[in-house]
Amino acid sequence: MAEKVTIATVARRARVSRQTVSNVLNAPHMVREETRERVREAISALGYRANQAARQMRTGRSRLIAVRIEPTRDGVNGSVLDRFLHGLTEAAEAAGYRVMLYTAPDPRAEIDAYDSLLGAYDLDAFVLTGTEYGDARTAWLTERDVPFVTFGRPWDNPAETAPQGRTAVPARHPWVDVNGADGVAQATRRLLDTGHRRIGFVGWPAGSGVGDDRRSGWHDTLLTAGLDPTGLDRAAPDGFAQGEAAARDLLASAEPPTAIVCASDSLALGALQAVGAPGGWPAGPGQRPEVAVTGFDDTPVAQAIGLTSVSQPLAQAAACCVDLLADVLDGSRRGGAAGHRRSDPASSGPGQVLLRPSLVVRQSG
Amino acid sequence: MAEKVTIATVARRARVSRQTVSNVLNAPHMVREETRERVREAISALGYRANQAARQMRTGRSRLIAVRIEPTRDGVNGSVLDRFLHGLTEAAEAAGYRVMLYTAPDPRAEIDAYDSLLGAYDLDAFVLTGTEYGDARTAWLTERDVPFVTFGRPWDNPAETAPQGRTAVPARHPWVDVNGADGVAQATRRLLDTGHRRIGFVGWPAGSGVGDDRRSGWHDTLLTAGLDPTGLDRAAPDGFAQGEAAARDLLASAEPPTAIVCASDSLALGALQAVGAPGGWPAGPGQRPEVAVTGFDDTPVAQAIGLTSVSQPLAQAAACCVDLLADVLDGSRRGGAAGHRRSDPASSGPGQVLLRPSLVVRQSG
DNA sequence: TACTTCATTTGGATCGTTCAAGAGGGGCGA
DNA sequence: TCGCCCCTCTTGAACGATCCAAATGAAGTA
């Protein structure tokens, strides 16, 4: 095994001091070009890699981002976190960060986990997935000036919708989210375009931010098209059986819909069952069911059975999370977050990104 | 913000030296009970947490375990890695380790990633998921004495099946796996017990370690029961459509099976479609299809639509991985891996654990 | 020439922990 | 009593990087 290569080894070989090597790495503009090249050469010749632990001890920054991995996903909509995690890891790697996992059975324990992670590992930032009403976690982190991004809008914050928020309102924090209303609207519009006029919706009970958002996409699209959504709306907790029951109820109404838009693939799967395509499962081409069904999340199941579904740009969302964090982290380090700001067409203000999902059309409608 | 609590702070408060505090944490037996208590009190009073970076710099050990998160799971069988990761994170946490993620588009890049992770972060160990034939990664890691565990048997190693392996055979390494043959056998036996006599199998083409293993479970169980498996076997790449085609082919044979065992939930989903349950999807209780179908992996889809499936004990597998790593790591540190050995009934030799999956019976058969 | 300015480079101190070596005190055999 | 060992605890020195203050040298200016 070769001798351990430290910054001193490199310095000796390039015939400069340790600090100059350090400067080449962290502040190249301070080093004369000729020297810089010499040092760079020595670095690659020796295969030098900065020891993160030593760097971290001195700077207090670990280049580590923590993400919670949740116990088990409910129903069909698993693997969403999976894909998000992959995107996050990739984006973080590109930005020079690493992703560390942690778990916590409940929010209380999650805050303890923050404390422990910050204390022992000097974590640079957190990514929270799934925001909740009155989220204690964001408050805790904000209070301690710990950088974080949420994947999901802060639903509980009235200031988000009404910019002139009250003083007691928690501080805004960077977030990334996917515009669920837009996704459902896309699905609904497409059904309108293909001739449907009575389009039902099966979503979650009112009161969940994500659910309400998705429902509004359907609702508003019908209104815009001059159609009356009354009576075409059903609410059910997420799940196959619940989706089936809700869809059956819709179909049994006086004027049953010719298409059903669902808030999730689980519900859509149930709805497909209720719809009862001729000849069994609506999979083969040409086996289009009489009542069109669309889902949300474009899960593997949807891909497998040919369910039209709204696909979230998870990799892009993850990349945005990393971008936002990098902005905050580099900003807080170099003083002043004046760096370049995202100017996406999808962006909606500094540090807050709303992405557009896309509709994946398959046989189900 | 409170003053930073270091080992020196604790030492002052407990009126001992830094080293004594360190000993209380790392070698309690060296400290007199009275002193130990005093130090422990100071630790919890001050909320002291050892700084991992400093510890790592001195010891060269990071208490970090790396796992690769793969690009995208194929088909329905996503979320398996998800669940495994969760179990791993939880078990690692309990053992005082943390899980770090990395990605790599191909094996070559994965080895580069090892190099980089080891160089910069001093990783303690790797967990590899999914072993391949002639795995270059395990060879690389073994060569450099980097501790690792694989989730999945090393299929390419003839010494694994024939203990008197040749000298050129790569060194054995610790692994954890789930006995796929056993799982399929359980499914097959249950079908036998419920009266089925002609039981078909839809699996992957021969040549994949996992696939061959699962097929053998079906094959051997039929033989043991005195039944002839000839003609009841179909091979297809993983996927819904492929499963459907293979199952249709089986059903069209001269003596069609009354039950079909599948190597994955994707295939099983297709088979269910081919089976064509009366009245559409075989979900409601009592809507048992005429031809029973079972899958493998107990994915969320199986749970949603009532598909009988073989469930892998992923959390337990993850915990075993951590146990094995902890053995190796603590062994290499304290000299001699003489520690306690797993004596599970499921265990099959030192450092190699084969777990038993369980059958989850649902409406599909 | 002497003084200032600027860009570049240097050496020492430091982060928080563990390792290595040693110090103090009591018990015990010679 | 001496010497030795063991138990317990303390002190100084690393680990490898960055921060800070100061030195160096060249060029510009009076």
Image (cartoon, coloured by chain):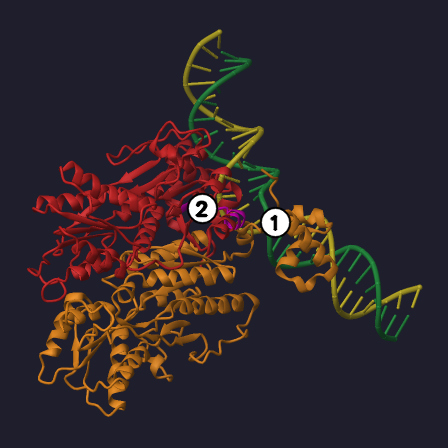
Chain colours: A orange, B red, C yellow, D green
The residue that mark 1 highlights is A48
Quadrant showing the N terminus of chain A? top right
CA–CA distance in space, label 2 to label 1 = 36 Å
Horizontal side of residue A340 vs A204, given as left or right: right
Image coordinates for residue C24, horizontal then vertical, percent: 52, 28
The residue that mark 2 highlights is B10
Tag 2, which chain?
A: B
The foreground one among A98 and A104 is A98
What's the residue at 72%, 62% (across, down)?
A33
Which residue type carries mark 1?
Answer: Tyr
Helix, strand or loop at label 1? It is loop
Q: What stretch is highlighted in magenta?
A: B115-127
Image coordinates for residue B58, horizontal then vertical, percent: 53, 42
The foreground one among A174 and A282 is A282
Looking at the picture, does residue D16 appear above or below residue A242?
above
Whether residue A250 appears in this view of the structure is yes
Horizontal side of residue B175 vs B62, given as left or right: left
Q: Does the magenta stretch include residue B120?
A: yes
